[in-house]
Image (cartoon, helix red, strand yellow):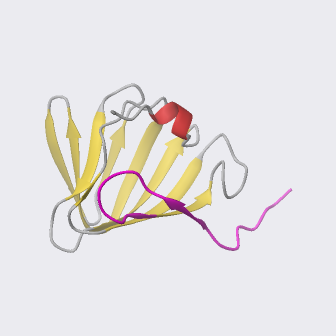
Amino acid sequence: MVKLIEKPTIIKAAGVGEKQIEELIGRVNSGTSEVSIARMKSPQGWFEPGQCPEFDEYTLVLKGTLKVTTKTGEIIVSEGQAIITPKNEWIQYSTPFEGGAEYIAVCLPAFSPDTVHRDE
């Protein structure tokens, strides 16, 4: 059955700073466990703990700049660019640059607090 998603659910983000997560498709808003799709609005100075998730994440930066730190270095993802982060690989997302970032995150399978495995 076709399902219209009329509006996202706002989810509190982990980390330092007031990042807004607008989940359109996922475990919370649509009851979907196969995939999650969310719009992130992240202010300058936001950062979250590192994580080693059990899901692949596909991220498209719509505005601003996102910094992705891995065990081997840092990747700067600018407006109009995308990054793929594979499951079971340690990563950390942040927006240290002026203006922060707005981006779309797609997780396969859907994001879950139980499978993200954030650093303490």
Q: Is residue 96 above or below residue 43?
A: above
* Residue that lies at the very extreme toward the right in this rendered image: 1
The residue positioned 65% from the left and 40% from the top of the image is: 34
Q: In this view, does 115 lie to the left or right of 48?
A: right
Query: Which quadrant would residue 19 be assigned to in this image?
Result: bottom left
Q: Is residue 19 magenta?
A: yes
* Residue that lies at the very extreme toward the top in this rendered image: 88
Indicate the position of residue 17 as horizontal and vertical percent values: 30, 62
Number of marks present in the image shown: 0
Q: Is residue 6 magenta?
A: yes
Q: In this view, does 9 lie above or below 37?
A: below
The residue positioned 17% from the left and 46% from the top of the image is: 75
* Residue that lies at the very extreme toward the front in this rendered image: 120
Q: In this view, does 4 lie above or below 115?
A: below
Indicate the position of residue 49 as horizontal and vertical percent values: 30, 42
Q: Is residue 98 above or below residue 71?
A: below
**Quadrant location of the N terminus in the rendered image:** bottom right
Q: In this view, does 17 lie to the left or right of 9?
A: left
Magenta-colored segment: predominant secondary structure: loop
Indicate the position of residue 112 as horizontal and vertical percent values: 56, 40
The residue positioned 30% from the left and 30% from the top of the image is: 90
Indicate the position of residue 45 as horizontal and vertical percent values: 20, 63
**Quadrant location of the C terminus in the rendered image:** top left
The residue positioned 73% from the left and 50% from the top of the image is: 31
- Region in magenta: 1-20
